[in-house]
Amino acid sequence: MACNYEINIDWSHEDGAFVADVAELPGCIAHGETHDAALANVNDAVELWIETARDFGDEVPVARGGF
């Protein structure tokens, strides 16, 4: 599944890892040792976030069109 949500990835000195978050999906955050790992992990998190929202009947925000 391609992620069309805007993803922000920053280095966290505190965590010693890259941290990726999806602002449009509250609480959808992942990390990785590399930029690519954080991106892959957050894409997995997006899929799980959407699946969980649908399971609970919650609204899934429409992606504004990240990458």
Image (cartoon, helix red, strand yellow):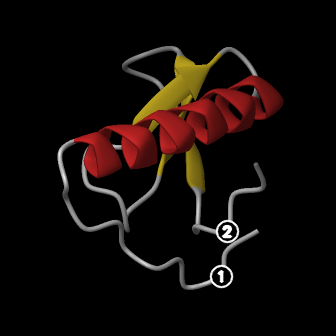
Q: Is residue 40 left or right of residue 12?
A: right
Which element is circle 2 on? loop
Amino acid at the residue labelled 1: Gly
Viewer-side residue, 57 vs 16: 57
Residue at x 58%, y 67% (from the top left corner) = 5
| Residue 12 in sight here | no
Name which of mark 1 and mark 2 comes first in the sequence. Answer: 2
Which residue occupies 53% across, 24% down? Answer: 31
> Quick one: SS at disc 1?
loop
Front-lying residue, 58 or 67: 58
Q: Pointer 2: what residue? A: 4
Report whether 16 appears left or right of 40.
left
Image height check: is 67 above or below 36? below
**In the rendering, which numbered label is found on residue 65?**
1
**Residue 42 x, y percent position in the rendering:** 58, 37
Neighbour tally class for label 2: few under 14, some 14-19, many 20 plus, Cα within 10 Å: some
Counting from the top left corner in percent of width and height, residue 3 is at 69, 58
